[in-house]
Image (cartoon, grey):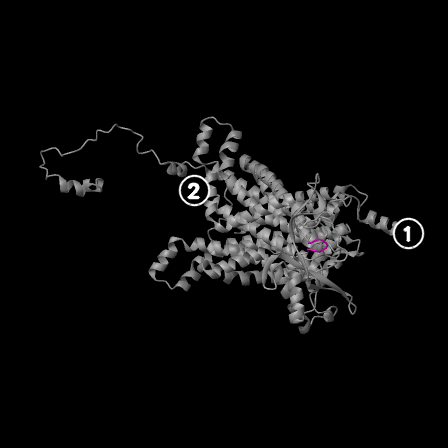
Amino acid sequence: MTDLLFAGDAPRDRANAPPAKPSEPLPHFVSDAPFDPYLIEKMTPAQERFYMASEWRMVWWKLRRHRVAVVSGAVLLVMYVSILFCEFLAPYGLDTRNTDFIYTPPQIVRIFHDGRLVAPFVYGFDYRLEMSNLERVYTPNPQNRQPLRFFCRGEPYRLWGLLPADLHVVCPARGGQLFLAGTDRLGRDLLSRMIYGARVSLTVGLLGVAVSFTLGILIGGIAGYYGGWTDILIQRGIEVIQSFPHLPLWMALSAILPVSWSPILVYLGITLILGMIEWTHLARAVRSKLLALREEDFCTAAVLMGARPSRIIGRHLLPSFMSHLIASATLMIPGMILGETALSFLGLGLRPPMTSWGVLLIEAQNINVVALYPWLMLPVACVIITVLAFNFFGDGLRDAADPYH
Amino acid sequence: MLSYIVHRILIMIPTLLAISIVIFTIINLPPGDYFTTYIAELQSSGEAADLAKINFLKMQYGFDKPIWQQYLFWAGGLLHGDMGYSFAYNLPVNQVVGDRLLMTFIVSFTTILFTYIVAFPIGVYSATHQYSWSDHALTLLGFLGLATPSFLLALVLLYLANVYLGISIGGLMDPLYVNQPWSVAKALSVAAHLCIPVVVIGTAGTASMIRRLRANLLDELQKQYVVTARAKGLPPMKLLFKYPLRMALNPFISDIGSLLPHVISGAAIVSVVMSLPTTGPMLLEALRSQDMYLAGSFLMFMAFLTVIGVFISDLALAVLDPRIRLQAGRSQ
């Protein structure tokens, strides 16, 4: 038993001390340093930072280790910041028509000319109308070199509809063109339209999630808190909603939106519709978490200390599964973005003066486009990148949401 | 078991009732009805509407009655198989729908089959080879499948299939066979045309199924009984198939319920793009022209299919997994 207790210092003691006779007291040592009962518990600042970290800080640490999630998060951040400055980032305006350049293929930015590294430039187009099938043929002309201009004065615009400005990140050469993603049937630059379209496409998911988040917490909270008949009724209601095929229901609901509504109202209506169906998953999550957490010791302790229900829910229950909720809400956004895209594509969602990626894809609705103007499908790349980024980020967030695990 | 079945069927009744009320509300929400739009359209083009006929239809379908009576009329009709009257087609909905429902069923059924056949081996492989390069590649592929809008995938595949395989664009069969009686050649043509919609509609479902199967199987593989069995020297394949895989299979059964709405949703939009003779394009058209009985009865039918699907999957789950208790535990 003693061997076990003093396993650490036993060998040294045996070596130094003379063999003790049973009658003599064991030799021992008393330190004369002042006694400080908190000595052991004192932590280095680094340890303190680690052990006393708040839950959110731990979530952040765990998320940081998930490299794909961090990269995705960065991509999303860049995208969301960029929607603030569309006018500045896009080389052309949203509705600028270049009537001489209809259905031009994308231009390629080149940096080598005659084997030498030069400033980025594009080749201008030679235009020819193929008389046999009336096809517009554009061929890049290596003689017509058009160096790009950066941070340049270009098409005037109003930033956020208020501040008049004309500064762009990149502009075509004077008298030249810059269609990095080609143009559509009206000669509008697709890249600029994609940059503007991000405004609607990216926010539709956020607003939709905000709607379903509110509904989910409220209704799930009521079900979990009151229990009994209220709970059963709400559960059945959720089952009813979940048993609808989403898209047909979305279609039916957006068919309700009156044609006379202004685009901005239609946009709000669509976000509301997207949010109104997706909340059920969140409500279920909230309810089950509430039911489970209600039985935890810290909750009982709070009740015994006389906390009111509102305080228990708001101060103790909600924060302990907020991270989970945010993670599952993040995973809902891609579905909404895809939903908006599909609805707009079908002509039931947003309508053309409003520009989203789905609206842009209306142009790519038939098989001729795939064969003749495949670049009109480029907006789908934005959709895929955004949805992928949200999925990876949400996955990482979900793993990180339980940092104590 | 019997009491469980009865219990489940009894629950289905109020569920379906609630669904029908929701649907009826939705299709009645847009201002005006088919007739007002129709009459306005005729008048704007300077033609006289056949008011007598319209009034007759209005009377027969109770458009002059209060809304709840209209609902009772519609729901009552549904009960004995009368799905109402399609004003746009001038035919009872049953006749309009007929063949298309069969096609929808064929497409959905094949898609689910496809999902299972593809998801099963891939899911097992990527769980048993966790974090290998092939696992990462498959995961990425799955995510891509979830992220690609199906309608565009459909267009591109259609184009490729036409260029490289010579399959005619659009439709579920070669134009040759459209009004022909069923024959081997027609069936083959349908099978060839079915490939693309099935792949396109199935992609998203397959991707999520793979992910779920992989996660479930990984959970099971970490359990102690697997370690024990391995320590006993059970051959790896036998071990995998005999125990953990059986446990991880639950999503295959329980997912029928959640898979069906997805498949039907996917089918709806993909069929619009590919102009398949299924219910999707018809629903879209009916919604646009406020052909309320057609739209409503469709939605109702889809929801009904889903409810039945969930019911069947619950039953199958209860039969196959002894851990599932038949008497639902009282929630606190």
Q: Is residue A245 above or below residue A9?
A: below
Q: Is residue B86 left or right of residue B114?
A: right
- Residue that numbered label 1 is attached to: B46
For badge 1, the amino acid type reads Gly
Q: Which mark is residue B165?
A: none
The main secondary structure of the magenta stretch is: loop
Chain at tag 1: B
In contact (CB < 8 Å): disc 1 and disc 2: no
Using the image as rendered, state which of residue B123 and residue B89 is in the foreground: B123
Q: CA distance from mark 1 to mark 2?
A: 74 Å
The image shows residue B114, relative to residue A303, as above or below, that is below
Viewer-proximal residue, A344 or B70? A344
Where is residue A293 drawn, in percent x and y?
48, 37
Residue A26 percent across, percent down from the top left: 13, 34
Disc 2 secondary structure class = loop
Q: Secondary structure at mark 1?
A: loop
Give the number of the disc on residue A404: 2
Instruction: Give the image location of residue A85, x and y in percent.
Output: 64, 44
Judged left or right of residue B241, residue B65 is right
In the rendered structure, does residue B260 fall within the stretch colored magenta?
no
Report how many numbered discs are placed on residues in the image.
2
In this rendered view, identify the residue nearer to me: A102 or B66: A102
Span highlighted in magenta in the image: A173-178
Q: Nearer the viewer, mark 1 or mark 2?
A: 2
Q: Residues within 10 Å of mark 1 (few under 14, many from 20)?
A: few
At a point 68% along the width and 63% down the height, the residue shown is A143
Q: Is residue A177 magenta?
A: yes
Q: Does any portion of residue A402 appear in the rendered image?
A: no
The amino acid marked with disc number 2 is: Tyr
Q: Are marks 1 and 2 on the same chain?
A: no
